[in-house]
Image (cartoon, helix red, strand yellow):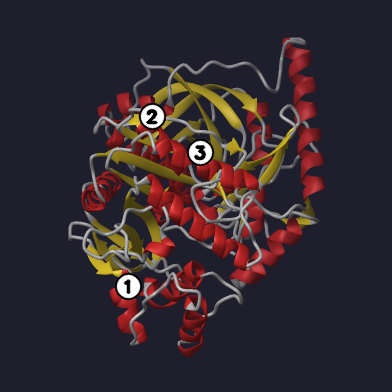
Amino acid sequence: LCSSMLLLRGLFHSKRASINSLPLVPLTRGSLSVSHQCSRQRRSYGVVHSNEDGGSATRTDYFQERKESLNSFLEDRTAKQGPSFNLYPVHLQQMPMGKFVELHAATLVEKQENKEVVESIEGRIQSVRNMGRMVFMSLTQGVHKLQVKFQATFEDRELLAVLRRGDVIAVAGHPSKTPRGEFTMVAHTANLLSPCLHDLPAFNNFLDPELRYRMRHVDMLVNKKVNETFRARAQILQQIRSFFDERDFVEVETPIMSHSAGGAAATPFRTRSESLKADLSLRIAPELYLKQLVVGGLDRVYEMGKSFRNESIDHSHNPEFTTCEFYQAYSDYYQVMDTTETLFRTIVAKLNDGNLVLPVLDKSTAEPSFEIDFSLPFKRISVMDALEEKLGVKIENLEASDAPMRLETLCKEHNVEFEENSTTEKLLDDLISSLIEPDCMRPTFLIDHPSITSPLAKPHRDHPQRVERFELFIQGMEFCNAYTELNDPAEQRRRFDLQTSAAKSTGQPKSPATLAAEAAFVEALEHGLPPTAGWGLGVDRLVMLLTNSTPMREVLTFPILKAK
């Protein structure tokens, strides 16, 4: 399954085993397809686990042998040091590993040691190399890695005999450099802080997606890119917040649960409050609340948090997802397009060492397949003009009763899949998704949507049947949705009523709670919403783009899975 490497193999049943008795065994595996490897791994975590020497043993055997070995070690230490000895001691960090490297690595040359300095560091054992009575261990702590050398004179041979890959240890020693110039700590003393009781898979060889998502902690220990992705995600979220904070936006939190999900057309998750004796929904989007805050005087407001849609799971959708929405008074969608370009360039430059050219990797080869140059102006395409050009017909009178039938005919003529009895909005979305969006590989704003698809957007100042709205697409995937907000309460009520009638005609009427939420929103508009632009970003998709990760589950720490 991977190239040959040397790994330490323990004799767990012997409580007196010397480190010298632990043989070096070459790891050799046959050539298997990825699907075959995944199948084997899935079986291994249910029944059999592959050993480092290519043989097999049950994971239960390894676990039991490790426990017996540690129990014997505990008995010996308790006899020598008293009942206070603990395999899981309290330990306070004295010096972070990164700080130790920063302070001492540059002060030494090859073959040099500084025995005047003794520091204590902690880390998890990633690998062990036995060189006779000398042992080298590679420790990691966060993003930092350090080699530790246990010389032949190191006294605690029983501890060395019991240590295994995955264990967390503390080591005190002095800095040095090997003849090849590798910075190394020469160990004086060491302590076991927390043993790893399970046999870890080989590095970068834990492949089965379902196992990786169910055992994310193991995935993080052996697949380096996973930790890198989660750290990049944290940096991206920080950059988004900094971007809006620096522009005088106020970050807020709006309800996750309410009587109506509101803010978008999607199927919500339902729950129930026993205290209120009422059915509640998890939010689909925070939009209506945020606009009410603008009415209340927060002219620049944003929120980053979770939303929920009880719909499909695929490579770019998850029922629980992270969004960022902002609303800016005295702005419009043209200005927000400029803001969007600036935001993307800021984040790309920060994560790409100042480079605005982002390589996109081919997933099968891990080699760059093409590049996205964010320094270039984002393309702007009128979505209806582009759709009419593709279809070869004008699309008009979308509020007429026969509009769904006409759109179904166009779907059939152009081999676009659709559901029977769909609304006009849904059929238009099907056509745009199939015929326009896949062509948007580089950053492209699809602008000026028909008003029937955008009930919360302001009518276009030059095209009355369209609205001032844009969607940002990259690699055929939507990242942002924004518009100049509709702030005319009478027009907003009319559009809600149109949606209500369409929903009834398809047999899926709006709930009383939804109707009440819409009425409350119109009442808020009657108090005066300033001319405002609103914007939403799919944060998970942005992380996917900037880390070259797919599917979306790769950028979620614990994606939802079917129950076992």
Neighbor class of circle 2 (other Cα within 10 Å; few <14, some 14-19, many 20+) is some
Specify the amino acid type for callout 2. Answer: Gly
Q: Is residue 140 above or below residue 547?
A: above
Tell me which residue sits at (58%, 52%) in the image. Answer: 309
Question: Could you tell me which secondary element the residue under label 1 belongs to?
Answer: helix
Q: Position of residue 59 (x, y in %)?
A: 77, 49
Q: Position of residue 564 (x, y in %)?
A: 77, 53
Question: Could you tell me which secondary element the residue under label 2 belongs to?
Answer: helix
Specify the amino acid type for callout 3. Answer: Ala
Tell me which residue sits at (47%, 82%) in the image. Answer: 406
75 or 538, which lies in front?
538
The mark nearer the N terminus, 2 or 3, is 2
Where does label 1 land, which residue?
Answer: 384
Distance in Å between CA atoms under marks 2 and 3? 54 Å
The mark nearer the N terminus, 1 or 2, is 2
Return the mark for residue 98.
2
Residue 232 appears anywhere in the view: yes
Distance in Å between CA atoms under marks 1 and 2? 55 Å
Q: Position of residue 547 (x, y in %)?
A: 40, 53
The mark nearer the N terminus, 1 or 3, is 1
29 or 281, which lies in front?
281
Q: Position of residue 310 (x, y in %)?
A: 62, 54
Where does label 3 land, which residue?
Answer: 520
Specify the amino acid type for callout 1. Answer: Met
Locate the N terminus and report the quarter of the image it occupies: bottom right
Quadrant of the rendered image containing residue 19: top right
In the rendered structure, the answer to whether residue 196 lies left or right of residue 56 reads left
In the rendered structure, the answer to whether residue 367 lies left or right of residue 413 reads left
Neighbor class of circle 3 (other Cα within 10 Å; few <14, some 14-19, many 20+) is some
Q: Going by the picture, which residue comes out furthest to the bottom?
A: 413
Residue 130 appears anywhere in the view: no
Distance in Å between CA atoms under marks 1 and 3? 32 Å
